Image (cartoon, rainbow, N blue to C red):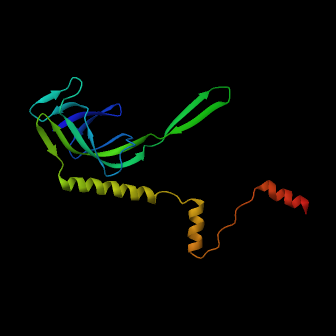
């Protein structure tokens, strides 16, 4: 049993128990439930219902698992022989949702509770893994050095300041 759902200007194939990465849904908190009403198609294995443009009394319930940003996309502009080059990056935000229930034409399908628990655990594990891969900021390094009893490294001065001090002596 599956359905085609439209959200954020894109169409997705929704199956119970699967996760989708949809464009950011800012008003939804992690753990909350949403109901998507724009169901374009519903198929239960025996018959297919197609909406004109959407199906009446059909909905897909989803649970918000996380908010994040996608991988960076680099945009490069270059004009030859003019020394003109511009680089810019962009990270599109997305919301990861778990499909918990599909209702249409008097038929419905719900997610198995164990499958929902597994998906939530997967998201938590991915978040921890992402945190471990991040390098420490300078402030975090100084705080870790102080906690370990080490003297923090002094801030480097710029070369021209050192040269100016040498000339004055």
117 shown above or below 18: below
* Residue at 26% from the left image edge and 32% from the top image edge: 38
Q: Is residue 78 left or right of residue 154?
A: left
Instruction: Please provide percent x and percent y for residue 133.
Output: 46, 57
Q: Is residue 8 left or right of residue 89?
A: left
Instruction: Please provide percent x and percent y for residue 76.
Output: 56, 33
Q: Quadrant of residue 2?
A: top left
Query: What residue occupies the far top of the structure in this picture?
Result: 52
Instruction: Please provide percent x and percent y for residue 150.
Output: 61, 74
Instruction: Please provide percent x and percent y for residue 68.
Output: 41, 47
Q: Quadrant of the N terminus?
A: top left
* Residue at 35% from the left image edge and 45% from the top image edge: 28
Q: Quadrant of the C terminus?
A: bottom right
* Residue at 38% from the left image edge and 43% from the top image edge: 27
Query: What residue occupies the far bottom of the structure in this picture?
Result: 149
* Residue at 56% from the left image edge and 73% from the top image edge: 147
Q: Quadrant of residue 83?
A: top right
How many numbered marks have been drawn onto this rendered protein structure?
0
Which residue is at the front of the view, 158 or 56?
56
Q: Is residue 52 left or right of residue 47?
A: right
């Amino acid at each position: 049993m599956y359905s085609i759902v439209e959200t954020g200007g894109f169409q997705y194939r929704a199956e119970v128990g699967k996760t989708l990465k949809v464009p950011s849904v800012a008003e939804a908190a992690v753990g909350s439930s949403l109901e998507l009403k724009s169901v374009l198609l519903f198929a239960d294995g025996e018959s297919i219902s197609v909406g004109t443009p959407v199906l009446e009394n059909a909905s897909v319930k989803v649970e918000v698992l996380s908010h994040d940003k996608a991988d960076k996309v680099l945009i490069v502009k270059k004009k030859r022989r003019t020394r003109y080059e511009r680089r810019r990056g962009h990270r599109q935000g997305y919301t990861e949702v778990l499909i918990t229930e599909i209702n249409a034409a008097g038929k419905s399908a719900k997610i198995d509770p164990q499958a929902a628990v597994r998906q939530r655990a997967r998201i938590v594990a991915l978040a921890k893994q992402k945190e471990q891969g991040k390098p420490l900021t300078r402030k975090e390094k100084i705080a870790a050095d102080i906690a370990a009893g080490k003297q923090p490294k002094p801030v480097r001065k710029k070369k021209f300041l050192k040269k100016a001090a040498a000339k004055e002596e």
